């Protein structure tokens, strides 16, 4: 338990440094929107962060620390901090989230998890959204997998409910490089048509070791604003001392 507390404190310190450096600082696998069914080992932590800029001048700086803890079963707990500019106005949101695996993934086998959480306005404390998702993963091989997401979103700022969806493909095509393609969105009523139109991202991840990775991602309409986006993201991992490398664990790329 002491080791886990240290890892959580180290993750929180890293987030504070990232937000402090940006002075501008809600997603699944880092800046990617379509989540996989896997979670890491109990006691491991990571800090995902990314900067996104759009052709319409929208901007987002995000830090997302997470740790896996034992709560009768392994549960990944995370909190996403997002400082953003939308239509020229600045805002800050905080989005706590949980995720737990129900059926482990494997080659030729469908695994799935359950996740959920909410989003809050950091300035007013208002609850702006509530969401729940079932992420599923079908693994083709040790280097290829499809991810499928289905869920529900309650946008409390306009009091509307949406069905959410996503399909993603991951391919680790070298020892250090991974390609991700994904389409996602939400279905329901919206005043602006682009809010319910499909959204897309394509990115490449460079992971030279088990601790650090960096992503470069191109996206379109990722917040429902019909703009093009470029995202640069990083992940810093704090694995448990006896945790096997990702390439040796079944269910992980």
Image (cartoon, grey):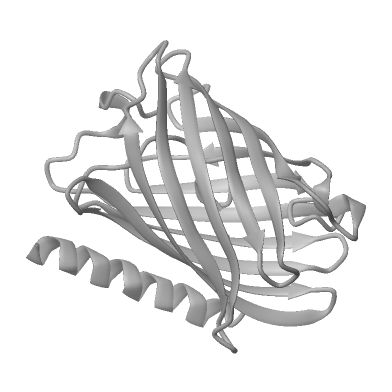
Classify residue 69 by image quadrant. Answer: bottom left
The answer, for residue 90, to whether it is visible in the render is yes
Q: Is residue 48 above or below residue 112?
A: below
Apparent side of residue 113 relative to residue 62 in the rendered image (left or right): left
> What percent of the width, then of the height, locates residue 107?
38, 13
For this view, does 200 lie left or right of residue 61?
right
Q: Nearer the viewer, residue 142 or 215?
A: 142
Q: Is residue 69 above or below residue 219?
A: below
Query: In this orientation, which residue lies closer to the viewer: 12 or 79?
Result: 79
Which residue reaches farthest bottom? 124
Q: Position of residue 106 (x, y in %)?
A: 35, 18
Query: In the rendered image, which quarter contains the N terminus?
Result: bottom left
Q: Which residue is depicted at the point 44% across and 48% down?
A: 115
The relative height of residue 23 versus residue 253 in the rendered view (above or below) is below
**In the image, is 184 to the left or to the right of 208?**
right
- Is residue 33 visible in the rendered image? The answer is no
Q: Quadrant of residue 247?
A: top left
Q: Which residue lies furthest to the top in this view?
A: 108
**Residue drawn at 75 percent across, 69 percent down:** 158
């Amino acid at each position: 338990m002491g080791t886990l507390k240290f890892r959580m404190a180290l993750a929180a310190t890293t987030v504070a440094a990232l937000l402090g450096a940006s002075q501008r600082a809600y997603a699944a696998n880092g800046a990617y929107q379509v989540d996989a069914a896997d979670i890491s080992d109990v006691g491991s932590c990571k800090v995902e962060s990314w900067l996104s800029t759009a052709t319409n001048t929208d901007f987002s700086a995000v830090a997302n620390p997470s740790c896996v803890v034992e709560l009768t079963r392994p549960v990944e707990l995370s909190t996403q901090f997002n400082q953003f500019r939308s239509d020229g106005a600045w805002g800050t949101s905080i989005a706590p989230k949980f995720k737990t695996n129900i059926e482990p993934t494997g080659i030729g086998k469908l695994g799935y998890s359950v996740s959920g959480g909410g989003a809050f306005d950091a300035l007013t404390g208002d609850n702006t959204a509530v969401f729940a998702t079932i992420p599923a993963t079908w693994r083709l091989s040790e280097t290829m997998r499809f991810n499928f997401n289905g869920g529900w979103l309650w946008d409390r700022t306009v009091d509307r409910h949406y069905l959410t969806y996503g399909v993603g493909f991951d391919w680790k095509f070298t020892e250090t490089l991974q390609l991700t393609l994904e389409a996602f969105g939400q279905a329901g009523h919206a005043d602006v048509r682009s809010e319910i139109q499909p959204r897309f991202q394509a990115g490449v991840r460079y992971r030279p070791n088990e601790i650090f990775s960096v992503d470069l991602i191109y996206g379109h309409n990722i917040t429902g604003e019909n703009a093009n986006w470029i995202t640069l993201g990083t992940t810093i991992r704090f694995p448990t001392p006896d945790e096997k490398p990702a390439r040796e664990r079944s269910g992980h790329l």
